[in-house]
Amino acid sequence: MEIRRDFTLKDFRNKLKELYELSAFKGKWFLKTVFIFSDNDVVQESFLEDIQNTLNSGVVPNLYTNDELNRIRDEGIITKKYREDGQTNESPDMINEWFFNRVKDNMHLSICMSPVGETIKSYFRQYPALINNTTIDWFMPWPEEALIEVA
């Protein structure tokens, strides 16, 4: 995801929708998708709210309107993949549930943040899913002061 300084929450959510659709039914079947999000991508802190929702439940609530979900179903691609998966109940709710389950199965989130400074501590306090629902990998040694502050 290429984020600019004038990137809005609407732009961010549109990119998320593209990732959802790519990981659920576009491209190759069972396409695994990695969404790499770094601290440089936090143009607005509301982006982190969507990241937290993704970490907590696997999806961003109310990302799609009913009209958008209807459009996705009516395009036929998702319905075709739904049938190929052996599903027979073609109710809108079942197709939507299948769609979001595919996103949960195929889209993975990688968050890259610097441990230096107050920003990461603030994010951890405001968005506890960044700690509770992730595995932290350090690729370089942290300064002892940073380890003490985050702990």
Image (cartoon, helix red, strand yellow):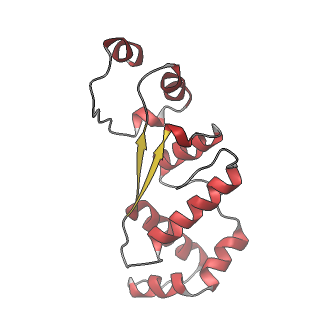
- Please tell me which residue is depicted at 29% across the width and 32% down the height of the picture: 138
- Please tell me which residue is depicted at 45% across the width and 83% down the height of the picture: 81
Residue nearer the viewer, 7 or 86: 7
**Image coords of residue 13 (percent x, y):** 63, 56
Depicted 100 relative to depicted 12: above or below: below
Residue nearer the viewer, 52 or 44: 44
**Image coords of residue 118 (percent x, y):** 52, 19
Quarter containing the C terminus: top left
- Please tell me which residue is depicted at 48% across the width and 26% down the height of the picture: 120
Left or right relative to 48: residue 34: left
Depicted 143 relative to depicted 108: above or below: above
**Image coords of residue 38 (percent x, y):** 47, 42
Depicted 41 relative to depicted 88: above or below: above
Image mark count: 0
Residue nearer the viewer, 148 or 80: 148
**Image coords of residue 112 (percent x, y):** 41, 40
- Please tell me which residue is depicted at 44% across the width and 87% down the height of the picture: 83
Left or right relative to 17: residue 23: left
Residue nearer the viewer, 29 or 36: 36
Depicted 3 relative to depicted 20: above or below: above
Quarter of the figure with residue 111: top left
